[in-house]
């Protein structure tokens, strides 16, 4: 079919049709003139640019600008007897952050955790290393006496435990709900986060377990004075809380009060200490996410796909399959994103996978498969190491001495989550993540920007004596993958 230009041109050149062409041209010009007037009017009517401390409205494809003075910092727990060389980066100790959040609380504390086990008796162990857990439990008990309301959600099913924590807390006036994820989604509530006064947030790998404070390597992020983010995370907490009622059923769709204006398409924009940050929360499983919430899997795959130079991943488990449903299914989404980034875009991949006494040896073939496509001659760079926490004299404490981290950092973004990287965690199990994309002047990048801190922590672990190249594993008594 001829173009509009061609039809007008042909009409002008063809005798009687010449005037028809001119009429059509005139109509087009008039329409364009009217359109231009309307656009100019729209521009003139546009509201003035907001002042520095005003909140910007959300725009399609844009960001949500916040007046909150949000500040972020990495949080870590380093197992006892694990020592690093001097002059390396560390996050704030997890114990300090939890105690700090409780001391700051004026109105409310809301905690989501897979399970609770803050004393050694819960697992039949006597160890002085449970003292920080006991202190945390004691401080939680005392919050109601300060007129601070405390709500806790945890999972059904949960790990086998004789924990009495929740019964103690309920007697002290804390509200507790157990969410039957086994019935609702065939999964578990695996999220781990705190919300304090609807303005401070902690998200990370640590359950409410004394071992998370002294025996397991954990990583998370604390965000202070960030009401916009905290209120958004509260929507996720509230979805768990509602589903913790007896005879609850998943809504389809979720009511509008659970919708979010903060997601991958519209991140929260904050600027603090000369660092500009774009933030959004992610969630899983899909059945717990309103359409406006960016799902965990979507965020992880998009972060890998958008990286241009490097992707550093630290996770406890990596399986391109499901792990818990029967029969197991192949689940290649993250694996394909990694292979595509390395092979097609020549992005440098480094993966630090945990290996402990209880790690599943079935993970090893998948890691070897990924490592096998490393090819310097074709500029394909995939390096895989296993992080092994020495057991030492702590062998009597079960399910410890492991790197429980769940994060990723690239040249474009940082992701800190609560899920291991296998299919069930994104299909049936509840998890959350925080995505942070930052810009900052070079001098403040490593000290002020979370992305810079996270890259420095990854480099520290990657270069440490605890990281063993997959090809050099051999036999290691503290790593089940080597047996």
Image (cartoon, grey):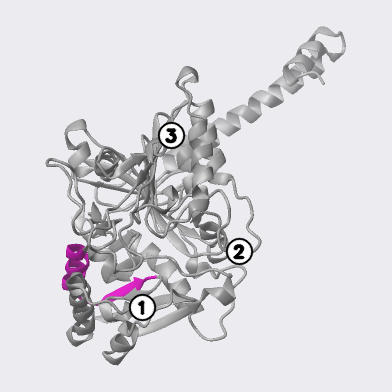
Task: Tell me the magenta residue range.
Answer: 95-113
Residue 41 visible in the shown view: no
- Is 112 a magenta residue? yes
Q: Earlier in the sequence, mark 1 or mark 2?
A: 1
Taking the spot 53% from the left edge, 44% from the top edge, the residue there is 365
Q: Residue 22 falls in which quadrant of the image?
A: top right
Please name the residue shown 36% across and 34% down the image.
Answer: 411
Which residue is labeled 2 in the image? 325
Q: Could you tell me which secondary element the residue under label 1 belongs to?
A: strand
The mark closer to the camera, 1 or 2, is 2
Location of residue 470 (image quadrant): top left
**Disc number for residue 71:** none
User: At x 17% / y 72%, what residue is drawn?
Assistant: 128
Q: Position of residue 27 (x, y in %)?
A: 70, 26
Q: CA distance from mark 2 to mark 3?
A: 32 Å
Please check the rendered image and state whether residue 101 is part of the magenta-colored stretch, yes or no: yes
Q: Position of residue 185 (x, y in %)?
A: 58, 70
Above or below 203: residue 269: above
Do labels 1 and 2 touch, CB within 8 Å?
no
Identify the residue position indicated by label 1 in the image.
152
- Residue 217, above or below 350: below
Q: Is residue 180 visible?
A: yes
Marks 3/1 in contact by CB < 8 Å: the verdict is: no
Please, what secondary structure does the residue beneath circle 2 have?
Answer: loop
Mark 2 residue crowding within 10 angstroms, few (<14) / some (14–19) / many (20+): few
Residue annotated with mark 3? 307
Q: Position of residue 240 (x, y in %)?
A: 46, 73
- Tell me whether the residue at label 2 lies in contact with that at label 3, contact meaning CB atoms closer than 8 angstroms: no
């Amino acid at each position: 079919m001829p173009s509009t230009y061609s039809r007008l041109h042909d009409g002008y050149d063809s005798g009687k049709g010449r005037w028809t062409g001119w009429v059509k041209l005139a109509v087009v010009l008039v329409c364009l003139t009217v359109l231009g007037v309307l656009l100019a009017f729209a521009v003139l009517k546009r509201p003035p640019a907001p002042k520095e401390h005003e909140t910007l409205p959300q725009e399609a494809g844009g960001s949500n600008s916040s007046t909150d003075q949000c500040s972020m910092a990495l949080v870590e727990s380093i197992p006892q007897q694990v020592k690093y060389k001097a002059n390396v980066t560390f996050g704030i100790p997890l114990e300090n952050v939890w105690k700090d959040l409780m001391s700051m609380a004026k109105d409310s504390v809301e905690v989501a955790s897979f399970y609770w086990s803050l004393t050694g008796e819960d697992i039949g162990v006597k160890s002085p290393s449970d003292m920080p857990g006991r202190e945390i439990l004691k401080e939680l008990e005392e919050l109601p006496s300060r007129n601070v309301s405390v709500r806790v959600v945890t999972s059904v099913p949960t790990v086998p435990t004789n924990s009495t924590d929740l019964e103690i807390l309920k007697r002290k006036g804390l509200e507790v709900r157990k969410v039957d994820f086994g019935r609702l989604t065939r999964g578990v509530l695996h999220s781990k986060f705190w919300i304090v006064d609807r303005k401070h947030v902690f998200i990370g790998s640590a359950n409410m377990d004394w071992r998370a404070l002294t025996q397991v390597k954990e990583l998370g992020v604390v965000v202070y004075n960030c009401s916009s983010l905290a209120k958004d995370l509260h929507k996720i907490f509230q979805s768990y809380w509602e589903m913790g009622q007896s005879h609850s059923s998943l809504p389809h769709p979720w009511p509008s009060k659970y919708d979010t204006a903060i997601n991958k398409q519209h991140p929260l924009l904050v600027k603090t200490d000369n660092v500009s940050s774009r933030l959004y929360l992610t969630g899983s499983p899909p059945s717990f996410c309103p359409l406006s919430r960016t799902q965990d899997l979507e965020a992880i795959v998009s972060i890998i796909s958008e990286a241009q130079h490097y992707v550093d991943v630290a996770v406890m488990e990596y399986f391109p399959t499901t792990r818990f449903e029967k029969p197991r299914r192949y689940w290649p989404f993250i694996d394909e994103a990694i292979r595509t980034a390395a092979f097609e875009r020549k992005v440098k991949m480094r993966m630090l996978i945990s290996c402990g006494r209880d790690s599943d040896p079935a993970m090893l073939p998948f890691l070897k498969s990924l490592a096998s496509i490393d090819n310097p001659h074709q500029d394909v760079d995939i390096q895989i190491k296993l992080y092994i926490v020495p057991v030492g004299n702590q062998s009597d404490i079960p399910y410890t001495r492991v790197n429980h981290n769940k994060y990723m950092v690239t040249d474009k973004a940082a992701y800190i989550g609560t899920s291991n990287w296998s299919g069930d965690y994104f299909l049936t199990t509840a998890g959350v993540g925080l995505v942070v994309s930052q810009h900052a002047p070079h001098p403040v990048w490593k000290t002020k920007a979370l992305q810079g801190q996270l890259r420095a922590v990854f480099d520290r672990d990657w270069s440490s004596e605890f990281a063993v190249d997959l090809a050099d594993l051999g036999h290691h008594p503290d790593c089940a993958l080597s047996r």
